[in-house]
């Protein structure tokens, strides 16, 4: 049985509470792409996209960063 995504709910509570700086800090250290996608989906379903431009930008930027292949040097 899968556990519900708690991280997205907590970040959404920060956003709704008006603490966008803390929400953006959490978005930057998101555990996974799945968690960020869940947050984005929750915001779309709640019709909250576009209300906080900086939060929308942080989600989009960090989704791109987490989805990109990792660059590394050969040993």
Image (cartoon, rainbow, N blue to C red):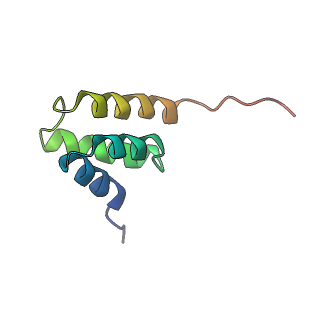
Q: Is residue 5 visible?
A: no
Q: Quadrant of residue 49?
A: top left
User: Percent from the top left, x then y, of residue 9?
Assistant: 27, 56
Task: Report the residue at 73% width, 31% height from top.
Answer: 72
Residue at the farthest bottom position: 1
Q: Quadrant location of the N terminus?
A: bottom left
Task: Report the residue at 21% width, 42% height from top.
Answer: 43
Q: Quadrant of residue 61?
A: top left
Q: Quadrant of residue 71?
A: top right
Residue at the farthest right position: 75
In the rendered view, would you say 29 is above or below 71? below
Residue 68 left/right relative to 62:
right
Residue 48 left/right relative to 15:
left
| Observer-nearest of 8 and 16 | 16
In the rendered view, would you say 11 is above or below 55? below
Task: Report the residue at 39% width, 49% height from top.
Answer: 35
Q: Quadrant location of the C terminus?
A: top right
Counting every numbered tag in the picture gives 0
| Observer-nearest of 72 and 1 | 72
Residue 46 left/right relative to 63:
left
Residue 23 left/right relative to 16:
right
In the rendered view, would you say 46 is above or below 53? below
User: Percent from the top left, x then y, of residue 16?
Assistant: 18, 48
User: Percent from the top left, x then y, of residue 57?
Assistant: 33, 27
User: Percent from the top left, x then y, of residue 69?
Assistant: 59, 30
């Amino acid at each position: 049985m899968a556990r519900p995504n708690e991280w997205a709910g907590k970040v959404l509570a920060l956003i709704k509470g008006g603490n966008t700086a803390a929400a953006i800090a959490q978005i930057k250290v998101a555990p996974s792409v799945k968690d960020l996608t869940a947050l984005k989906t929750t915001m779309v379903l709640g019709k909250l996209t576009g209300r906080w431009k900086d939060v929308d930008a942080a989600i989009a930027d960090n989704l791109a960063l987490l989805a990109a292949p990792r660059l590394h040097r050969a040993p």
